[in-house]
Amino acid sequence: MKIKNFCLVLAIFNIAIALSTSQIFAQEDFKTIKISDARLIGIERGLESVDYWNVRIRPGDEAAARRQINELNRISSRLERLSNVDEAEKRWLQGQCKSLLESLNEKASPVNSKNSNAKKTNQSKSQIKSKPSTREKQTMETKTTGSQMTLEEARQVVKKMEAKYENELVVPEARKMMKSGQMTLDDVTYFVEGMKKLDQNIAKDVPVLQKMEQLGVGSHLLKRLTGDYGIASEMKREKKNLKIVLDQRIRSGYEHAKSAAGMDIEKNKYSFVTESVKSNYLTRMNNTIETLRNASLIETALEMEPTWSPKLADVERYLTTYQTKVGQASRHDELPESVNSQELTKIAKKVLAVKKYEVGDVEKMIVNSKKTPRERIEVVWRNDRFERIVRVWEEFQVCTVEREDGKRMVYFNNVRKFSKAPNPTPIDQWILGERWKSGEIDPQKVK
C-alpha cells in the first residue's frame, strides 16, 4: 500500500515538473531569440524562406501551400534529429514551425465551400487549425491593450510592404538613362524621385519590420531592405554605376571643350570659320553643359560628393573662349540690315551707355531684329524637392561696330526686358543680356 502511494506521489510530481517546463518553454515562444548555434542557423534560414513564400500564397491555393508544407516538414524533421544544441533556441524554432504549419494549413483550405460536409472533410485532411496557437493567443491579448497586433495582421502588413517594393518602389537603373546621349531633366526626375521615395519608405518601414520580427514574420523583407545584398545596397550600386557612366560622358565632352578653347586661331582657322565644324563644336559643348547642369542637380538632391558641379563652370568658360575666337577669326564683308525702329534704337543707346556693361567706343549701331518674346524654364533642387524657375522676357538684337586698337570689330548684343524672373533679375527694365565679338570688318564697309 505504501509502495502504491509512493508511486502515485512520484507520478504527480513528474506531471507538475512537466507542466512547469512547458510553461517556461511557452514563455520563450513569445520572445524573439537570436539564433547563435551554427547548426540551427540553417534551420532558421529555411524557415525564413518558407515564411517568405507563405505571405505570398493566396488563401485557397492548396497546391502552393502543400509545397511549402512539404518543405516545412522536411525542415522540422532535420530540427528534431539535431541533438546537443541550445535547447531554448531549438524550442523557439519548433514554435516557428508550428506557427507556419498552422498558417499554411489555413491557406490550403478552400476559401468558399459549397457545403459544410466538404469543408469538414478538407479540414480533416489538411489538418487545418481549429483554434489559435499559443503565440496568436498572446498577440491577440496584447492587441486589446494596443501594444501589439495579431500574427495574421502582421503577415498582412508585411505582404502589403512586399507588394509595394515589388511593384511601386523599384531601384532606378543608370543603364536606362541618357538614351539621347546626354542627361535630361526626365533622367534627373526618374533617378532622384526614385531614390528619394525608396529612402523615405525604407526609413519608415524598417522600424515597423523590426517590431514584426517579435511575431516571427518580416525578417526576410527586413534583410531585403537592409542586408548586404538588399535594396539599400542596390541603391548604392546604381549611384556608383551612374557616376561611372556620367564620368565617361563628361570626361569626353570636357576634354573636347578644353581642346576647342585652346586651339590657335592661325593654325586651326578651319575650325573657327567653317560653318559645319563650328556647329559641331558648339552643339557638343552645349550638350556637355546641359549634362553637367542636370548631373549637378542629382548631386545636390542626393547629397552626393560634388564632382560634376565644378566642371560646369570650366566648360561654360571654354564655350565663351571658343565663341570669342570664332569672332576673331572671322572678317565681315557687310553689316546686317536695320529694322528701322527709332523706339528700339533709343532703348539700345540707353542700355549700352550703362558703365557696368563696359561697351567700347561705338562707331555705328544697327538694330537688326524686332522684339521677340522668349521663355525659359529651369529646374533646381530646393527644400528637398524640385522647383521650376520660369523666366519670361522679350528681346531684340543690336549690332555695334567698335574701335579697338585701330581696327573695327563687330559685336552683337541682346537687349532684353523680363516680365517674370526670380530675384535679383530686374523686372520691366531693359538690360543687356549676352554680348559677343563676331569679328573684324573693313573700315570702308562701315557707312
Image (spheres, rainbow, N blue to C red):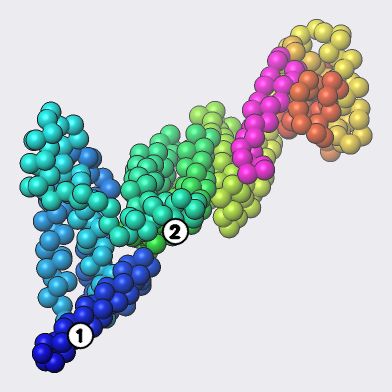
Side of 99 where 409 appears, left or right: right
Asked whether residue 29 appears in the rendered view, the answer is yes
Front in this rendered view, residue 236 or 395? 236
Tell me the residue that label 2 is attached to: 211
Front in this rendered view, residue 294 or 182? 294
Name the quadrant containing residue 361: top right
Give the x, y percent position of residue 152: 33, 48
Amino acid type shown at disc 2: Lys
Count of numbered badges drawn on the protein: 2
What is the CA distance from the residue labelled 1 to the residue labelled 2? 45 Å
Looking at the rendered image, the disc whose residue lies closer to the viewer, 1 or 2, is 1
In the displayed orientation, state which residue is furthest to the front: 1
First to last magenta residue range: 372-400
**Within-10-Å neighbours for mark 1: few <14, some 14–19, many 20+:** few
Front in this rendered view, residue 214 or 42? 214
Tell me the residue that label 1 is attached to: 9
Residue in the image at 11% along x and 87% along y: 4
In the displayed orientation, state which residue is furthest to the bottom: 2
Rendered position, 215 above or below 326: below
Give the x, y percent position of residue 37: 27, 79
Residue in the image at 64% along x and 28% along y: 377
Give the x, y percent position of residue 256: 52, 46
Specify the label residue 391 is tagged with.
none
Q: Does the magenta stretch include residue 397?
A: yes
Q: Does the magenta stretch include residue 101?
A: no
**Within-10-Å neighbours for mark 2: few <14, some 14–19, many 20+:** some
